[in-house]
């Protein structure tokens, strides 16, 4: 009985499951799984030009094949081909074309989504990069304290626009200088400039020169970067699309230093913007020319040249690292509201910047000491304020020490560069001038200039875009209205300064395998080039409009290699003791558009005139003293109180 009851139970369970399966088949399925391929197949079938494709196959298999077969057979054998051969080739061509046609449809159904996804990744990357450039630009302006500093920075952004009207120029000048009469004069100058009446521009310049110079002298103290832009506007020389926008020098070195030392504060928001612009223009087809030099000949000279180039690269990095870290400290103090932009403006001389930073750190240490006394007397209410000040002071001291170490390393790198230079000079003198001088004309031996381009292939563009899209999706970075947000702990948080800096690091990592940002020659080439003008970007543009604008602006920038040629000539004369002959000067002027006056000055430089080593220090590095004991004493006492 037990066995029969077990069988009845199995039968009832089987009938129950059968009814459930039938009921499920009767229901309407709301699951979209499996419909994607069917929809893609229908879309491909509807988008295929069946009539045109079949007519093409019939035309190729019929008249084209038969005429080709008849002509070839008749020329080779002197008689028409047999009917069986004609039929064979007709059927062969017809079947081959038909099979290939349906194979393409099958491939589009199976692998077509990969191409569609690649196009979506490219579009999303261009769209997000453009919006991030605008967002970081707004962060730069927003990082200035509310008031005159932010007003001047916004006015400077306006004056850099190519399409600014005379009224806009006058408005920006008034915001920048606070002089309404001078702003009206600048508006009149821009009106005459647009009409091509440059004689009137010169008249107004002569008439108001003293007033203009007074305003620029005042502006030099509060916004040095604005002086150059405003002076060009007064001279009737506005920004031009063809020239592009000058890059912030050494921005690549600062980003790479932040990666190497795992310290995001070694880069500024301007560096973030420059890195995003570089990625945007390369993805949109920008080709950036650069000049390098190479030696082929005596192996000892070749090795000495490689060592000299390596030491010069280390020297340039050491030269930039000290100022970069000092600049990063100044930006950090402004971001944390411990200093104002009037106290630490961009473009300030290094020695003056050191003096102002030390004064601000003195004041910060004094405030920490006062808060320590307050916590001891009043207890917990002041501890949170003290903790915030302690964090700022500790990070400031770390950046100050890093800046001091950077300038100390500059001296060591300078000594190593002198030794490598002396070794090159000895070998060049031993093997003769012809072995170490710049060679022109045909041939491969000697010191020669090479032209190279920094650009991305279609496959590399796709790889960079996929890298960036994967990062942005992983960070859940999304745009809401006019601002970017990241999702953390299920909540949306605005894009922070740290998040923007991390984004620049990710862009550098995405570009490095393809354009090799870590190579000194690439860094020099990019620093010598101008960036694409992207003033036409607007927040409400579609992805297609942003891509079209980026591609058009990348083609608009002239491939000006004059600045790169002048920098290369300076390096050859100053570091490699190469004589810049008249023939070499003519070549650099005619081939690359270098300025004859600059080359003439370099040619008059006599590198071999001295008996001793020649210093390569272009500027005397600032004296950065050791951190003061008062700073450490305030920090230690504060930490003791908080612990």
Image (spheres, rainbow, N blue to C red):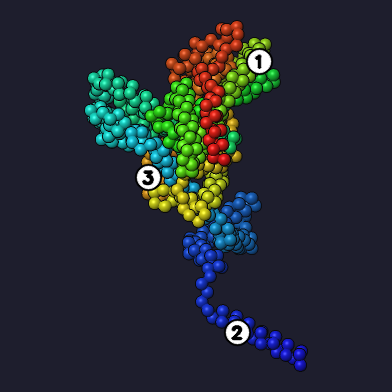
Q: Nearer the viewer, mark 1 or mark 2?
A: 2
Nearest to N terminus: mark 2 or mark 3 = 2
Q: Secondary structure at mark 3?
A: loop
Q: Residues within 10 Å of mark 2 (few under 14, many from 20)?
A: few
Nearer the observer, 11 or 422: 11
Q: Secondary structure at mark 1?
A: helix
Point 42% across, 43% down: residue: 135
Q: Could you say which is closer to the camera, residue 298 or residue 359?
A: 359
Tell me: residue 359, above or below residue 383: above
Q: Which mark is residue 423?
A: 1
- Which residue is nearer to you in this view: 595 or 609? 609
The disc label shown at residue 19, or none: 2
Q: Which mark is residue 538?
A: 3
At mark 2, the secondary structure is helix
Can residue 417 be seen from the camera position used here?
Answer: no
Real-space CA distance between mark 3 and mark 1, rounded to the nearest whole angstrom: 55 Å
Residue 152 on image: x %, y %: 34, 33
Image quadrant where residue 23 sits: bottom right
């Amino acid at each position: 009985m037990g066995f029969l009851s077990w069988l009845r139970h199995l039968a009832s369970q089987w009938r129950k499951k059968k009814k459930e399966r039938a009921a499920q088949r009767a229901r309407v399925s709301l699951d979209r799984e499996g419909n994607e391929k069917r929809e893609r197949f229908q879309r491909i079938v509807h988008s295929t030009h069946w009539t045109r494709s079949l007519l093409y196959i019939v035309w190729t298999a019929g008249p084209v094949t038969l005429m080709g077969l008849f002509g070839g057979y008749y020329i080779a054998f002197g008689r028409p081909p047999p009917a069986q051969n004609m039929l064979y080739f007709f059927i062969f061509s017809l079947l081959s074309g038909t099979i290939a046609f349906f194979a393409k449809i099958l491939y589009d159904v199976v692998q077509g989504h990969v191409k569609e996804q690649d196009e979506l990744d490219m579009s999303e990357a261009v769209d997000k990069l453009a919006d991030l450039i605008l967002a970081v630009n707004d962060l730069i302006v927003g990082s200035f304290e509310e008031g005159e500093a932010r007003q001047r920075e916004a006015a400077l952004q306006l004056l850099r626009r190519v399409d600014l009207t005379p009224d806009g120029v006058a408005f920006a000048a008034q915001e920048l200088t606070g002089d309404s009469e001078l702003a009206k004069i600048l508006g009149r100058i821009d009106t005459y400039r647009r009409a091509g009446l440059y004689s009137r521009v010169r008249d107004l310049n002569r008439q108001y020169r003293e007033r203009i110079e007074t305003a620029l002298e005042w502006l030099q103290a509060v916004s040095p970067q604005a002086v150059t832009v405003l002076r060009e506007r007064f001279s009737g020389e506005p920004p031009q699309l063809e020239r592009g926008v000058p890059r912030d020098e050494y921005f690549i070195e600062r980003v790479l230093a932040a990666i190497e030392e795992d310290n995001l504060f070694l880069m500024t928001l301007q560096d973030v913007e420059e890195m995003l612009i570089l990625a945007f223009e390369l993805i949109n087809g920008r080709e950036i020319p650069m000049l390098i030099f190479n030696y082929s000949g005596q192996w000892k000279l070749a090795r000495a040249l490689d060592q000299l180039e390596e030491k010069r690269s280390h020297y340039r990095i050491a030269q930039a690292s000290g100022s970069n870290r000092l600049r990063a400290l100044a930006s950090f103090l402004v971001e944390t509201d411990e200093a104002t932009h009037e106290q630490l403006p961009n473009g300030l001389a290094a020695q003056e910047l050191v003096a102002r930073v030390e004064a601000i750190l003195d004041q910060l240490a004094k405030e920490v000491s006062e808060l320590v006394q307050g916590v001891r007397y009043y207890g917990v209410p002041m501890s949170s304020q003290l903790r915030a000040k302690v964090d700022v002071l500790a990070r400031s001291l770390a950046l100050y020490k890093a800046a001091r170490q950077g300038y100390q390393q500059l001296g060591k790198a300078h000594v190593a560069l002198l030794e490598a230079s002396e070794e090159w000079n000895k070998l060049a003198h031993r093997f003769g001038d012809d072995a170490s001088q710049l060679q022109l004309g045909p041939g491969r031996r000697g010191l020669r200039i090479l032209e190279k381009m920094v650009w991305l292939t279609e496959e590399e563009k796709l790889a960079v875009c996929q890298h960036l899209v994967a990062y942005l999706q992983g960070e859940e970075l999304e745009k809401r209205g006019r601002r970017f947000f990241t999702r953390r702990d299920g909540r949306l948080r605005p894009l922070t300064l740290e998040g923007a800096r991390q984004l620049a690091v990710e862009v550098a990592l995405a570009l490095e395998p393809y354009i090799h940002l870590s190579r000194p020659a690439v860094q020099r080439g990019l620093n010598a080039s101008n960036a694409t003008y992207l003033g036409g970007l607007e927040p409400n543009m579609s992805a297609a409009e942003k891509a079209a604008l980026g591609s058009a602006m990348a083609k608009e920038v002239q491939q000006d290699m004059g600045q790169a040629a002048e920098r290369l000539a300076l390096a050859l004369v100053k570091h490699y003791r190469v004589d810049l002959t008249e023939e070499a000067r003519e070549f650099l002027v005619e081939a690359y558009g270098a300025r004859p006056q600059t080359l003439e000055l370099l040619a008059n430089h006599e590198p071999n005139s001295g008996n001793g080593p020649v210093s390569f220090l272009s500027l005397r590095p600032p004296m950065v003293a050791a951190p003061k004991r008062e700073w450490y004493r305030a920090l230690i006492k504060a930490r003791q109180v908080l612990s």
